[in-house]
Amino acid sequence: MSEEKNILEVSHLKQYFPVQQGFHKIPLKAVDNISFTIKPGETLGLVGESGCGKTTVGRTLLRLYQPTAGRIVFDGEVLYDSEEKIDVDMLPYRKRMQMVFQDPYSSLNPRMTVEDIIGEPLDVHRLYSNREERRDKILELMEYVGLNAEHATRYAHEFSGGQRQRIGIARALAVNPQFIVCDEPVSALDVSIQAQVVNMFADLQKKFGMAYLFIAHDLLIVQHISDRIAVMYLGKIMEIAPSDELMDRPIHPYTLSLLSAVPIPDPKTARESKRIVLEGDVPSPLNMPSGCPFRTRCAYATEQCGQEMPPLNDRGDGHFVACWNR
């Protein structure tokens, strides 16, 4: 049996932003040479601390930012390739790739009703033949995400954060996409609402079979919804593995410290578990350390770490780690 092809293949993706310093422009390396794949119907979780480039990855994949270099292949079709000078028009692909934004307060137009917000993708791609069909599709989408039909004529400011995020999710679903970038979709919500929204993402995936890139801070949320997890630090992927494997057998020193910070509900276990506190501050992306970017805070760092960035090595069972000494 042939192996299932990937819905998304990312190779050596770079996203640099020019920043003015005095009379010179220097590159801020937000995403620096990362590669990964996502299969149809799979969820890849992307975790890391603030400012490590997670959101930039999602936006670059959907070409909301123009990539600096690399190759993006979606469903067998090359969307961007810096070496072969391929740069396709994204409008036909917008139907198949969507995004749920982090902030449900700023990602919805305050002057539009819920019906018009959810209906806008249908209008842009002309996915209905008459007004009645448009209205039926919108009400059906609202039902999928747990909103009532009477909400259709209201404005975004009349809703709570959780409800606004549901409106954003319905808008993303409107074009029946194959792939959705979920950019920290629950971080702005109350903890009590987060679980509901994450479970809704899982239910919608079962129903429609789309793939997710699920970006988040919270490792427990990511483990709950993801098939695989990639750990990112300063624009680079440090470790990538099936979610349970990563939680049970983390290898990279950065992953170990991230996991040690996850709260444990049992007080006895929490007291016995040892928190790994990292020394020093996160280096500036404008002035990155040579070699491995984590070496300035790593207890295992050697001379080799300062000379070159370790590649992602396969440690078996789909577990890849970028570390010379672990």
Image (cartoon, rainbow, N blue to C red):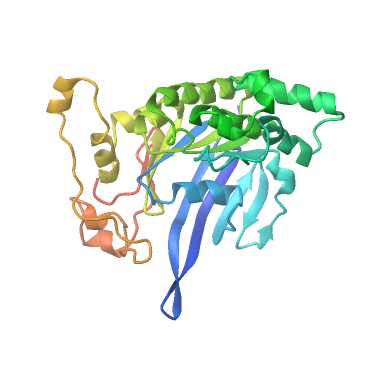
In this view, 29 is above or below 189: below
In this view, 71 is above or below 211: below
User: Can you give x and y, in whole percent of width and height, for residue 307 in the image?
Assistant: 29, 64
Q: Residue 98 occupies which quadrant of the picture?
A: top right
Q: Is residue 33 left or right of residue 272?
A: right
* Nearest the eye: 188 or 265: 188
User: Can you give x and y, in whole percent of width and height, for residue 42 in the image?
Assistant: 53, 30
User: Can you give x and y, in whole percent of width and height, for residue 53 in the image?
Assistant: 43, 51
Q: Quadrant of the C terminus?
A: top left
Q: Residue at x 82, y 24 (%)?
A: 133
Q: Residue 81 occupies which quadrant of the picture?
A: bottom right
Q: Residue at x 66, y 51 (%)?
A: 79
Q: Residue at x 59, y 22 (%)?
A: 145
* Nearest the eye: 274 or 263: 263
Question: Which residue is the extreme one toward the bottom?
Answer: 23
Q: Quadrant of the N terminus?
A: top right
User: Can you give x and y, in whole percent of width and height, for residue 235 in the image?
Assistant: 41, 54
Q: Is residue 276 left or right of residue 5?
A: left
Q: Is residue 115 left or right of residue 165?
A: right
Residue 96 visible at all: yes
Q: Is residue 325 left or right of residue 4?
A: left
Count of numbered circles in the view? 0
In this view, 137 is above or below 83: above
Residue 5 visible at all: no
Q: Residue 113 occupies which quadrant of the picture?
A: top right
Question: Which residue is the extreme one toward the right?
Answer: 129
